[in-house]
Amino acid sequence: MRVIGCQLDIRWEDKEANHARVRKLLEKAAPGRDSLVVLPEMFATGFSMNVDRVTDDRDRTTQKFLSRLAVEYKAFVLGGVVTRCEDARGLNQAVIYKPSGRELARYSKLHPFSYAGETGHFAPGTGIETFVCNSFKVAPFICYDLRFPEAFRAATRRGAQLLVVIANWPAARESHWTRLLEARAIENQAFVIGINRCGSDPNHAYSGGSRIIDPRGKILRDAGSSERWIEAELDLRELIDYRKAFPALNDMRDDL
């Protein structure tokens, strides 16, 4: 399966401009039929706590944008959006569209970043989500979730073979991003796609570091620090054979 990740220099709270940036990158990447395209967390606005500004509007403009991309490229498209929950807080979500343009899955970030006050503006999700894409079982996660290996293990127990992390992960903790992505790949014997933003917003600088990692922890692609796209071909048979040859997951314990 061909996977494409778009590392964006997100323009602050400017949905139209960021939609255009995504289009520019994808015109160059030219996703083929049934590719998986991955965009960062809150790709249309940046990581803002102004829920009124970042929530997708009543016309679902950003979600429809993702759906149209899926239809135009005949690809699977995953991107970060914000919607409202019942208590008026936002839900920080990853939504996935099929090549038909229909929604395939929707995941809400399990761990709002309390250190930065995210819990006051965004409600936590309630569970793991998985979906099937080109025979791969995929589990999406968002940014701070990366620090909680038990969530990734739960996805692996459900059969996940590809773990996708979308983020606005600041440069101040860049080394944590890179090391934790590799750890999630190694410990779960899974492919990992980590797609971050680059550039800066009014609060932070972002160093990018988007990458695609194989089940052994080998970095297949690294986006560096600038706006660009990366791609790789993922081989499901390779993953299955590796898990059979080194069956560490068979020794997971449910009693602890």
Image: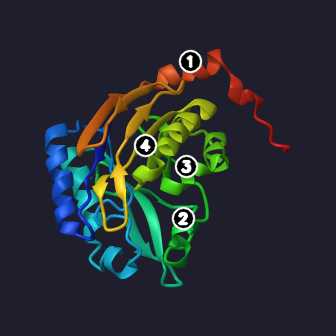
Mark 2 vs mark 1: give the one in front. Answer: 2
Local secondary structure at mark 2: loop
CA distance separating discs 2 and 1: 37 Å
Q: Which residue is mark 1?
A: 241
Residue 50 location, x and y as percent?
38, 78
Report, in whole angstroms, how far the alpha carbon at label 4 lies from the one at label 2.
18 Å
Tag 1 or tag 2, which sits nearer the N-term?
2
Q: Amino acid at mark 4?
A: Gly
State the residue at coordinates (48%, 44%). Answer: 177
Residue position marked by numbered label 2 in the rendering: 113
Counting other residues with Cα less than 10 Å from the Cα at mark 2, is it few (<14), some (14-19), or many (20 or more)? some
Q: How many angstroms separate mark 1 from mark 4 (CA)?
A: 23 Å
N-term-proximal mark, 3 vs 4: 3
Q: Quadrant of the N terminus?
A: top left
Q: Which mark is residue 194?
A: 4
Residue farthest right in this picture: 255
- Cα distance in 3D space between marks 1 and 3: 26 Å
Q: Residue furthest bottom?
A: 87
Label 2 near label 3: C-beta < 8 Å? no
Nearest-to-viewer mark from 1 and 4: 4
Q: Residue furthest front?
A: 172
- Residue 116, which numbered label? none
Q: Nearer the viewer, mark 4 or mark 2?
A: 2
* Earlier-in-chain disc, 3 versus 2: 2
